[in-house]
Amino acid sequence: MHNAVPDIGRRPPFTAERRVAVAAAEATGRLLRGHFADARAVRTKGTHGDVVTDLDLAAEELILTRLRRHFPHDRILSEEAGLHDTGSGRTWLVDPLDGSNNVAIGLPAYVVGIGLCVGDIPVVGVVHEPVTGRTWHAVTGQGAHDDDGARLRGPCGTLPGPGPVLAWTQGHAVARADPVATALRGALERRCRRVLQLWAPLLGWSLLARGTIDGFVGYRAEGVDLPPGALLAAEAGAELRTLRGAPFRPGFSGPDSGRSFVAARAETLTYVLEEVAAAMRGRGT
């Protein structure tokens, strides 16, 4: 059972939504784990050779079917199917296989992500890792938890001596030679112990929420997986900032230029923001 908050009297907000999302993500994980070795690319998308596999499509159909059954009046924005618009103010975000490029080459680094936004504000976030069978979930104002109900505490915030370990993500539309992305990555790689480009942003968010890594930097991130992942990390105690240090609000709408961020805590957050600022000054931006 996945009862992060005990059902005593009136249930906390979004309890049903969290439970449906967790169950859908875990069912999808079983599907993906069982067919991982047989995955095949069915098409590419974008200009950088990102692939869509047959598992993406099968996983997406499983999740969409469940969400439509339980919440028929809600909107759904899914990685491959796009927007199913009902006119509702509630929007489910679905990344059925975050890490498709990894799966396509046989690398078992992938997760399932499901989120719910009210307006443009994330209220539920679920990340499931099929390889380990672990699930992490968050509801706004209720903290982030693992599948045993233990609360996630996020990164400690103390700056490690050798420098922090960060995850990095950039959106599909960012060119390989994008000067801002190149400057940011270069600066971070010189001044941090490790900068991980996982090809699965939600995996990075789950690592941050668990405190396995120290921070996460994103440049023009994708809108589908950003809100649920950011909610998970924020509810675990991570602080989210824009690249210029202002508070960052992780919505899914609007241009990707508004989806660049630093997520960390305390000393590490200050350190990473200073390195980002130096890189931006070096470019005259």
Image (cartoon, helix red, strand yellow):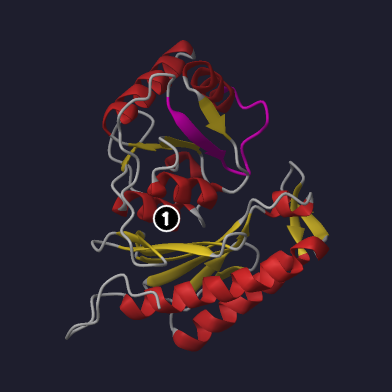
Question: Does the magenta portion include 197?
Answer: no
Q: Give the range drawn in magenta.
A: 164-179
Percent x, y of residue 121: 33, 59
Taking 84 as reference, is 216 left or right? left
Percent x, y of residue 216: 44, 37
Which residue: 36% across, 35% down?
Answer: 242
Percent x, y of residue 218: 48, 38
Which residue: 39% across, 30% down?
Answer: 243
Q: Mark 1 highlights which residue?
A: 227
Which residue: 44% across, 83% down?
Answer: 71
Taking 111 as reference, is 152 left or right? left
Label 1 sits on what residue type? Pro
Where on the picture, by quarter, is residue 253? bottom left
Observer-nearest of 165 and 186:
165
Observer-nearest of 187 and 8:
8
Percent x, y of residue 106: 77, 52
Can the viewer see residue 102 in this picture? yes
Secondary element at tag 1? helix
Above or below: residue 66 compared with residue 160: below
The quarter of the rendered structure image containing the N terminus is bottom left
Q: Residue furthest left?
A: 9
Observer-nearest of 85 and 209:
209
Q: How crowded is mark 1: few (under 14 residues within 10 Å), some or many (20 or more)?
A: many
